[in-house]
Image: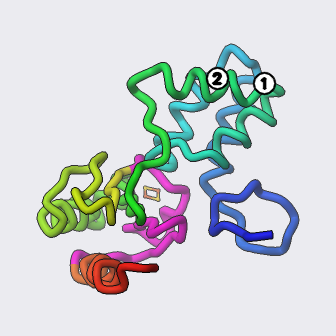
Amino acid sequence: METKTLTKKPQKSGKKVDKRFKIIDITMKRNHYRQDALIEILHKAQEAFGYLEPDVLEYVAHALKLPLSRVYGVATFYHLFSLKPSGKHTCVVCLGTACYVKGSDKVLAALQQELGIKSGETTEDKQVSLLSARCLGACGIAPAVVFDGEVAGKQTADNVLEKIKDWQQNGEE
Ligand code: FES
């Protein structure tokens, strides 16, 4: 079986746990796992991930004991939610306070300029989707950026542009 990077349920696998799931956990707990809090929970999840991807939707459905179809139904019905972006690669820049004060706005601006797209968009060649999030749960390594599900800390405009160039050069990966 293939293992996907990062967006895994926080299980005791001994592997790195994605802290963003903790943000979802806290929100669900605060709402006593009420099914009618689904929108609020998805909203929080999107703030943390930048978009709602299948693993996240499954995680929420499971925790709230809701059919996945219902969670997908809500996620696709409301315009404020965006599902996994269509680019081959995704880059999520954290604009939460801790990251912002350390210059994540400049990181995002550099990416927007280089790629010629705004946050929330995908390049025409479908290589890169650029997104932003409010807090990735990695404030200690601010400013944080997630490249294809892998959180990278202490990012600068220069090194994110390098990463993007890498992607562009190695079209197949
Ligand atoms: S504010 Fe960026 S990880 Fe928390």
Q: Residue 97 has which mark?
A: none
Does 42 sit above or below residue 136? above
Quadrant position of residue 13: bottom right
The residue drawn where x is 36% and y is 59% is 93
Q: Position of residue 105 (x, y in %)?
A: 23, 59
Q: Secondary structure at mark 2?
A: helix
Q: Secondary structure at mark 1?
A: loop
Q: Residue 66 has which mark?
A: 1
Q: Position of residue 168 (x, y in %)?
A: 29, 78
The residue drawn where x is 42% and y is 67% is 144
Does 169 sit above or below residue 121? below
Quarter of the image with the N terminus in it: bottom right
Q: Sequence-wise, which precedes: disc 1 or disc 2? A: 2
Q: Which residues are magenta?
A: 133-157
Residue at numbered disc 2: 38
Q: Which amino acid does the dot numbered 1 rest on?
A: Leu
The residue drawn where x is 25% and y is 62% is 125
Quadrant position of residue 158: bottom left
